[in-house]
């Protein structure tokens, strides 16, 4: 179990990690709880954890004497990264685990990186004809002219972050107010988190999310609609109890449900995901389903959307955690047949 991490979602990750740890215990697994501190150090029982290229992870087991001892091979069979955002969900940690030669839950370096970067995911999915809102990469030549063509309000976001951090909604400026539409300010706010900034057209649609589980041929959960007690699904609405209502199945009609589940699986495959993901959509009044984003390590407490959707689809939390460990081992097995 790897929890914490260097991103602004450190706390969120620790909550998810504690829950997954409990789920794994319930499913009969022995769990070693490694924490990534805000500064990036990996720790276990207050001591350092080292990554041994090709040799797994070393650290101090509970109960072993403290002191200068760097610890020994932890004999970890599968790592379950429960990390959100940069360094944890974007392929960096996954690459580290590949270097150590350990099986891990979830997407590999490529899938993680592609899904973390909203600009890259949208370019890839757009190329393959997946419907989505129009977008522009800010701070590239001609971006202002192109952004002016988008449907307002605009959504300005750091390309590689999550939990709604750094996102601003920008309303169309009143006539005659010149350039005072807050767009520059919003872009600067997003760029403070990530030099890659995306500007999206608005979708007035319902927010509907679908959980995925599997490797090459992922299963999809019943989709659920997010009803946030807020103007939009911001950080507060995401993490304050009672500020969000999840309606499962989303009231969008059986045909739309089937279409959305197919789209979720298609995006999962296109992006090269493994194990788990939560794919988020906008469903518009006329029934059009638009991709918003896909998260390779979604919030993962027992009451998070990812888990709730599986529960509503008949898969209990400990079983879900257990399935993910098995999927990691299966992927490892499949990859061991590859030649480099
Ligand atoms: N293009 C858009 N149209 C309408 N609402 C949006 C749009 N983009 C984002 N939002 C609102 O902002 C929230 C967070 O945006 P999202 O792209 O999902 O970022 P994050 O990765 O931080 O979750 C969405 O859940 C939605 O409420
Ligand atoms: Mg989101």
Image (spheres, grey):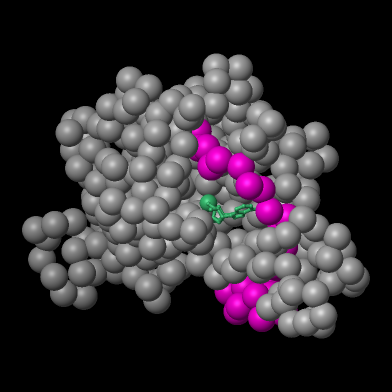
**Count of numbered circles in the view:** 0
Left or right, residue 300 beside residue 214: left
- Residue 163 visible in the snapshot: no
Camera-nearest residue between 215 and 210: 210
Q: Which residues are magenta?
A: 184-210
Residue in view at x 21 percent, y 30 percent: 27
Q: Is residue 139 above or below residue 43?
A: below
Task: Give the side of residue 94 with respect to residue 190, left or right.
Answer: left
* Looking at the image, residue 98 lies above or below residue 338: below
Front residue (pair 18, 134): 134
Q: Is residue 62 left or right of residue 176?
A: left
Residue 7, horizontal then vertical, whole percent: 45, 68
Q: Report if residue 266 is visible in the image.
A: yes
| Quarter the C terminus occupies | top right
Name the residue at 42% across, 50% down.
228
The residue at the point 38 percent across, 39 percent down is: 246
Residue 150: quadrant of the picture: bottom right
Q: Position of residue 218 (x, y in %)?
A: 53, 25
x and y percentages locating residue 106 in the rendered image: 48, 40
162 inside magenta stretch: no
> In the shown orientation, is residue 63 left or right of residue 291?
left
- Residue at image coords 72%, 42%: 132
In this view, the residue in front, 307 or 32, is: 307
Task: Choose between 198 and 66: the one closer to the eye.
Answer: 198
Q: For residue 159, which quarter of the picture?
A: bottom right
Queried whether the magenta region covers residue 208, the answer comes back as yes
Q: Residue 242 in the image: state x and y as whole percent.
A: 28, 51
């Amino acid at each position: 179990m790897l929890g914490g991490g260097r991103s602004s979602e450190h706390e969120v990750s620790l909550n998810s990690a504690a829950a997954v740890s409990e789920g794994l215990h319930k499913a009969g697994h022995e769990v070693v709880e490694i924490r990534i501190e805000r500064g990036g150090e990996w720790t276990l029982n207050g001591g350092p954890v080292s990554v041994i290229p090709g040799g797994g992870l070393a650290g101090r087991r509970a109960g072993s004497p403290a002191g200068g001892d760097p610890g020994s091979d932890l004999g970890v069979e599968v790592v379950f990264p429960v990390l959100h955002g940069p360094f944890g969900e974007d392929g960096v940690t996954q690459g580290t685990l590949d270097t150590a030669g350990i099986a891990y839950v979830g997407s590999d370096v490529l899938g993680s990186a592609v899904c973390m970067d909203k600009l890259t995911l949208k370019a890839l999915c757009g190329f393959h004809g997946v419907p989505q809102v129009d977008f522009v990469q800010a701070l590239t030549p001609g971006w202002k002219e192109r952004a002016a063509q988008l449907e307002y309000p605009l959504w300005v976001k750091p390309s590689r972050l999550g939990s709604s951090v750094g996102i601003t909604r920008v309303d169309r400026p009143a006539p005659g107010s010149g350039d005072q539409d807050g767009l520059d300010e919003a872009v600067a706010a997003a760029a403070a988190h990530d030099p890659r900034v995306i500007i999206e057209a608005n979708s007035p649609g319902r927010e509907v999310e679908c959980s995925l589980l599997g490797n090459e041929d992922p299963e999809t959960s019943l989709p659920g609609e997010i009803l946030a007690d807020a103007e939009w699904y911001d950080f507060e609405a995401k993490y304050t109890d009672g500020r969000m209502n999840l309606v499962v199945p989303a009231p969008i009609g059986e045909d739309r449900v089937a279409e959305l589940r197919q789209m979720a699986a298609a995006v999962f495959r296109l992006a090269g995901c493994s194990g788990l993901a939560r794919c988020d959509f906008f469903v518009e009044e006329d029934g059009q389903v638009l991709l918003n984003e896909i998260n390779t390590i979604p919030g993962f407490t027992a009451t998070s959307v990812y888990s709730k959707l599986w529960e509503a689809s008949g898969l209990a939390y400990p079983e879900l955690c257990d399935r993910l460990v098995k999927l990691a081992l299966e992927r490892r097995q499949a990859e061991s047949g590859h030649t480099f």
